Image (cartoon, rainbow, N blue to C red):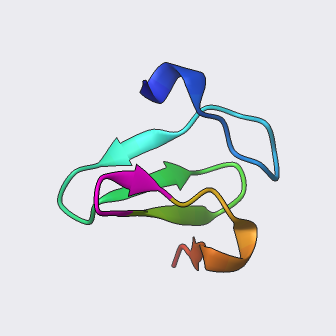
Amino acid sequence: MLEALICPRTHTRLSYDAAKQELVSEAAGLAYPIRNGIPVMLVDEARKLD
């Protein structure tokens, strides 16, 4: 399923961080949370990467 998801801001591929349960967009500098097994693909819900 990961192949079908793209970053809503940059339209680039995401990588999966299993430890943090996030989908990471290096291009946007954002990490989208996965809650209860469901990716939350909203920019407002994303965490900024350090």
Residue with the most extreme left position: 19
Nearest to the observer: residue 49 or residue 32:
32
Can residue 25 be found in the magenta stretch? Answer: no
Report the residue at 71% width, 34% height from top.
12
The image quarter containing residue 30 is: bottom right
* Residue 28 x, y percent position in the rendering: 72, 57
Report the residue at 29% width, 62% height from top.
36
User: Please, is residue 4 above or below residue 26 in the view?
Assistant: above
Report the residue at 59% width, 50% height from top.
25
Nearest to the observer: residue 23 or residue 49:
23
Write the start and end of the magenta stretch as one range. 35-39
Could you tell whether 48 is left or right of 20 in the image? right
Magenta stretch secondary structure, dominant: strand
* Residue 15 x, y percent position in the rendering: 44, 40
Could you tell whether 16 is left or right of 5 in the image? left
Report the residue at 54% width, 61% height from top.
40
User: Please, is residue 14 above or below residue 40 in the view?
Assistant: above
Quadrant containing the N terminus is top left
* Residue 27 x, y percent position in the rendering: 70, 49
